[in-house]
Amino acid sequence: MGILISLLVLSGLIFFHELGHYMAARLMGVYVEVFSIGFGKRLFTFRKWDTEWSLSAIPLGGYVRMKGQDDSDPTKKSYDEDSYNSKTPIQKIFILLAGPAANFILAFFLYFAIALGSPNVLSPVVGDVLKESPAFSAGLKTNDIIVSINEVKISSWKEMSEMISAAKGSINLEVDRAGLIEYLTLTPTLKEAKNMFGETIQKKMIGIGSAGVTHPLELSLGETLTYASEKTIWASTMIFTGVQKLIMGDVPAKELGGVISIVKLTSDASADGWMSVLFFAALISVNLGVLNLLPIPALDGGHIMFNLYELIFRREASDAVMMKFTLVGWAILFGLMGLGLYNDINRLVG
């Protein structure tokens, strides 16, 4: 069941990506020949709105084939009025950006739905207190609830952690201890920690761990919109940064995951309920949007790069150059997919 949910989620995200391209193409007057979810043998096909809609056997991608555009052979062009090639560079860039944009918009709505469902967040309840830490010296105890820091009310562990990390000098804590209010003063110290990319960083901490207590996040409509916006921006920034660190070598290539990882993680999320699935679907949706913007000729970002060239130099790149770059792009793309698959198999076998 988990694998089926994973494939449905992945296919749904791909559908919205391609739908963005489709709608933008139609808006620009481009004839869309095929809209396909998946690759390989076609399992189900019908014709509607002058387009052939297909569901294919390998549900690990999709494509919108427009008149005059063929990624397998970029030299095949048509300059009919309803062809992709007859449009201006700005119009073509609009069509290309519409796919990733659809993924970012979908992620926003998924986060919005999550916010409406009152997701659980970690409460600022103290678990373990490390000996000889600032918290231990100040007298913090297990099950203490941090109510405020420097007279600023906090409602989650994340808020508390961010305020401690940003603290300059000592901080004043208001603590609820079994219904009684205590006031403590302590000074966070710099310690080594791991960030989300596995890098060692210096971070201000006070030496406490979470008790694992959670509470539902109750938000107004305005706060719900803010939550969805912030989460979408956070996910986009995180993935952009992750790609950058991977390219620069700051994150080892073994951390790259492939489709098996996506299916497994989505399947695991489905065991924790619909909200976990929505969280992961939103993250994958942003991931699809970001990765498709990379300047690799086989992806949207590569096509955008060619159109920017045409916009700046007032001429199209030559067929020979287009063909060479496209072949290199496919080689890079298949190389990354192969590396992700290799890493996935290594993780599965331990």
Image (spheres, rainbow, N blue to C red):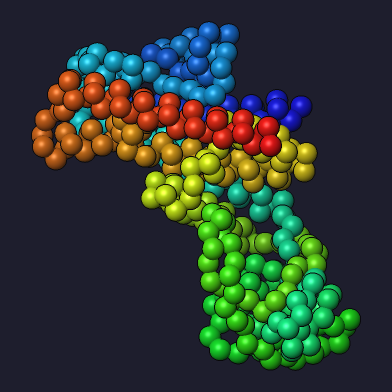
Q: Where is residue 65 in the image (x, y as percent from the top left)?
A: 38, 18
Q: In this view, does 247 lie above or below 323?
A: below
Q: Quadrant of residue 76?
A: top left
Q: Is residue 48 left or right of residue 136?
A: left
The answer to whether residue 241 shows anywhere in this view is no
292 or 193, which lies in front? Answer: 193
So how many labels did they put on this image? 0
Q: Position of residue 58 (x, y in %)?
A: 56, 17
Q: Quadrant of residue 142?
A: bottom right
Quarter of the picture holding the N terminus: top right
Q: In this view, does 332 lie to the left or right of 216?
A: left
The answer to whether residue 61 shows anywhere in this view is yes
Q: Position of residue 244 (x, y in %)?
A: 40, 50
Residue at position x 58%, y 43% from top?
A: 282
13 or 124, which lies in front? Answer: 124
Most distant residue in the right direction: 178
Quarter of the picture holding the C terminus: top right
190 or 212, which lies in front? Answer: 190
Residue at position x 14%, y 40% from top?
A: 312
Residue at position x 65%, y 62% from top?
A: 220
Residue at position x 18%, y 25% from top?
A: 321
Q: Where is residue 224 in the image (x, y as percent from the top left)?
A: 61, 57
Q: In this view, does 189 lie above or below 209?
A: below
Most distant residue in the left direction: 314
Q: In which quarter of the image is residue 186?
A: bottom right
